[in-house]
Image (cartoon, rainbow, N blue to C red):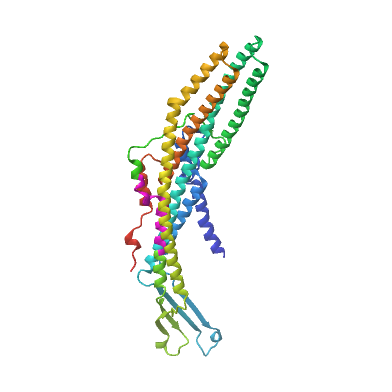
């Protein structure tokens, strides 16, 4: 026991020292300690590198890769020791003992199949890791869009608060001159206070969205956000949508189904080999034999693989799972295709509606308010008309920002539906995902 503890101590201490002194470990921690975030794509990159769930999946994927390396090895040899205790201390007899060494021998192709099953599990985890990265990037962009949307609403709110302060002065002057009622002064003050309440709610919403982003990117509490208040406009090169639509099978979700199917194929091949007898060779030395020529024995052992339904039922179960995966693959392909069509349609809709707001609706609402204010000051217009024009402009500005938010958010949804983390360099991204989840046919073949 002392020897064991000494060996364990000699192995564990250097490991712990290497863990805490390893520069890569320290660098990985420090990379997430970013004090200031200035753009959304930096935020996405941080989330992909620092998110705890992503790191956990990456560690499990690495653990499975280690198991794959061990899966193709021979089973351990077996050593059996036996003694005849009544021969000990007996002068008339030599000490009696039996020593047997045996080694299971796999059928050709069995070790390769075991390794392929484990490799397929690694490919399933790789596909899950890639898909989770896509979903994480999408959630970061959606949360970022909400934060920026509410930031723009704060700016709009502040400009309308300033408008109402101006209106209140105008209404009070007219009330003092007897050309406006007291109710107009009270209504103008009420509208101003409603905007103050909305500003408090918007700022609280921004705080909650910043908190969500810090969680997604695993950022420190003191991390600050200083970004452009406008969401970036989105665009795609011509024919990109059709090209992405033609590459559904390269998406991580489809690669994951493919890996599961390959795993079941290999498991079924293993189950079929399980019908064969399991062979082992053995060598035995038996000192109890009086004749020296009989003490050494070599031989072959095998099991008797009677079925009684257990092997055939296991194979039928695997075939049923294969059938289920085939149906899931068909359903997933249609689902991914229609998600692409729908998100692309919503994104295009947001682009066209935002252009309408910029070209027609916003200028019209602004001109209407300016005209109504001039008419009210001159006595030709009513306070109700002024109130209606202000509310119309406020609603139009809010909807314009909402549509801009939707344009960015739907592009994030479309990027995720395309099976990508980033739309820039999408061809390289899809090819990379495909290579990470591809299967080496030579390694997966079995005899």
| Residue drawn at point x = 44 percent, y = 25 percent | 360
Toward the viewer: 330 or 107? 330
The answer to whether any part of residue 69 appears in the image is no
Quadrant hosting residue 427: top left
The answer to whether any part of residue 328 appears in the image is yes
User: Residue 362, image x and y in percent?
Assistant: 47, 25
The magenta stretch spans residue 248: yes
User: Residue 323, image x and y in percent?
Assistant: 42, 63
Find the residue positioned furthest to the top: 177
In the image, residue 442 sits, relative to residue 216, either above or below, namely: below
User: Residue 355, image x and y in percent?
Assistant: 42, 29
User: Residue 183, image x and y in percent?
Assistant: 67, 19
The magenta stretch spans residue 403: no
Magenta stretch, overall SS: helix
Q: Quadrant of the C terminus?
A: bottom left
Toward the viewer: 124 or 414? 414
Magenta residue span: 244-264
In the image, residue 231 sits, relative to residue 83, either above or below, namely: above
In the image, residue 23 sits, relative to residue 164, either above or below, namely: below
| Residue drawn at point x = 51 percent, y = 31 percent | 399
Toward the viewer: 271 or 205? 205
Q: Quadrant of the N terminus?
A: bottom right
**How many marks are shown on the rendered structure?**
0
| Residue drawn at point x = 39 percent, y = 82 percent | 298
């Amino acid at each position: 026991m002392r020897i064991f503890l000494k060996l364990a101590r000699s192995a564990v201490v250097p490991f712990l020292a290497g863990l805490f002194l390893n520069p890569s470990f320290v660098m990985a921690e420090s990379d997430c300690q970013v004090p200031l975030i200035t753009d959304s794509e930096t935020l996405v990159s941080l989330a992909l590198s620092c998110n705890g769930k992503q790191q956990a999946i990456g560690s499990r994927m690495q653990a499975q890769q280690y198991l794959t390396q061990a899966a193709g090895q021979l089973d351990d040899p077996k050593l059996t020791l036996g003694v005849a205790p009544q021969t000990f201390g007996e002068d008339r007899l030599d000490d009696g003992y039996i020593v047997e060494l045996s080694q299971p021998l796999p059928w050709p192709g069995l070790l390769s199949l075991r390794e392929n099953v484990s490799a397929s599990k690694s490919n399933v985890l790789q596909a899950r890791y890639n898909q989770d990265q896509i979903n994480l990037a999408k959630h970061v962009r959606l949360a970022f869009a909400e934060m920026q949307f509410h930031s723009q609403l704060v700016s709009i709110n502040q400009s309308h608060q300033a408008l109402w302060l101006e209106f209140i002065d105008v209404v009070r002057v007219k009330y003092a001159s007897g050309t406006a009622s007291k109710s107009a002064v009270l209504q103008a003050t009420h509208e101003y206070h409603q905007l103050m309440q909305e500003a408090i709610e918007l700022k609280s919403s921004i705080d909650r969205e910043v908190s969500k982003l810090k969680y997604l990117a695993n950022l420190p509490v003191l991390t600050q956000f200083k970004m452009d208040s406008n969401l970036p406009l989105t665009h795609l090169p011509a024919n990109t949508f059709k090209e992405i639509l033609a590459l559904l099978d390269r998406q991580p979700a489809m690669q994951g189904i493919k890996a599961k199917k390959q795993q079941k194929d290999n498991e079924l091949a293993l189950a079929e080999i399980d019908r064969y007898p399991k062979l082992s060779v053995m060598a035995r030395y038996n000192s109890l034999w009086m004749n020296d020529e009989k003490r050494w024995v070599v031989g072959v052992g095998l099991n008797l693989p009677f079925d009684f339904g257990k092997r055939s039922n296991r194979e039928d179960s695997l075939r049923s799972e294969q059938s289920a995966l085939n149906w899931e693959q068909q359903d997933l392909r249609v689902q991914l295709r229609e998600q692409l069509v729908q998100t692309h349609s919503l994104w295009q809709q947001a682009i066209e509606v935002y252009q309408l707001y910029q070209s027609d609706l916003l200028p019209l609402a602004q001109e209407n308010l300016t005209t109504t204010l001039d008419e009210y000051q001159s006595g030709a217009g009513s306070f109700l008309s002024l109130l209606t024009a202000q509310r119309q402009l406020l609603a139009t500005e809010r909807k314009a920002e909402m549509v801009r938010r939707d344009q960015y958010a739907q592009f994030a949804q479309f990027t995720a539906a395309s099976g990508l983390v980033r739309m820039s360099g999408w061809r390289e991204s899809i090819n990379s995902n495909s290579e990470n989840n591809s299967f080496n046919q030579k390694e997966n073949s079995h005899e």
